[in-house]
Amino acid sequence: ILNVKYDGLSTFKSKEQRYNQIPKRSKATAAAPIAKSTDSDDDEKHEFNGPIDKLLRSLNSDPQSLVRGKDFNRWQIVPAATLTHLSLGSIYAWSSFNQPLMRTHGVVAPASNDWLLGDITLTFSLVMGGFVWGAVFSKYLDRFGPRACVMIGAGALCSGFSLASLAVEQTSLPMLYAGGLVWGLANGWAYVPPVATLLKWFPDRKGFAAGICVLGYGGAAMIAAPLFTKLVAQFRRLPEYLG
């Protein structure tokens, strides 16, 4: 019974019978070497041995250095991926900054050089529009690996916050928009890699893998909104002009 196999045509054949039906290659064909494309090999070598790839290997952040064995506990990745999306989803608490940004100079009423609500909300649109960078740099997301992409996203997130803070200090609306653009890079670089990584580690629970990341992104406002309100109340410098 172990030496026969159903061939799909309602007949059973032994291993020897199936082997005899396989077309045999002639000696000339068998001895002929298979031509290899040197161009593709050179391209692959150039693609994965550039200066950026060497830098990632030196930082132990390239995809090959992140390979783990079967004994690795895959549940350790879940908190990291969720916290990454929790940081990215803090943009949903942007409304906590509306009133303070509209009262940077006036107290009772907005001053003549205060920003309008429409000016401020455009920053939120620029941040959310940063998802387009995920499509633009899609081929680099797999090449750089999840760790490097999340590091780039973290740098963009911190830089966006810093530019927004500097824009308030200098009362520069273009700088505020620049902060929104840089902040949006974080969505493009760091949103997809955590989800893709969890999907690879949880092939039997793909819905859970994708849902836990979306939970962190969508539910970030519940944590970020009171946190931003408390930080603004503590560090905000009140204006001195009674507009």
Image (cartoon, rainbow, N blue to C red):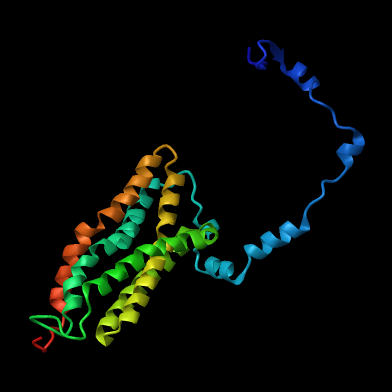
> Among all residues in the image, which is located at the extreme bottom?
241
Left or right relative to 228: residue 36: right
Above or below, 233 relative to 137: below
When asked about the image quadrant of residue 126, the answer is bottom left
Nearer-the-camera pick, 35 or 73: 35
Task: Provide residue 170's location: percent of width, then percent of height.
Answer: 28, 87
Q: Residue at x 23, y 59 (%)?
A: 221
**Residue 153 versus residue 198 in the image, above or below:** below
Snapshot quadrant of residue 177: bottom left
Q: Is residue 187 above or below residue 241?
A: above
Q: Is residue 163 above or below residue 61?
A: below
In the rendered image, the residue lying farthest to the right is 28
Labels in figure, total: 0
Q: Is residue 221 left or right of residue 37?
A: left
Q: Position of residue 167 (x, y in %)?
A: 29, 82
Q: Residue at x 41, y 48 (%)?
A: 198
Residue at left offset 13%, top offset 74%: 233
Q: Quadrant of the N terminus?
A: top right
Q: Quadrant of the C terminus?
A: bottom left
Left or right relative to 6: residue 116: left
Would you identify the image quadrant in which residue 28 lies? Answer: top right
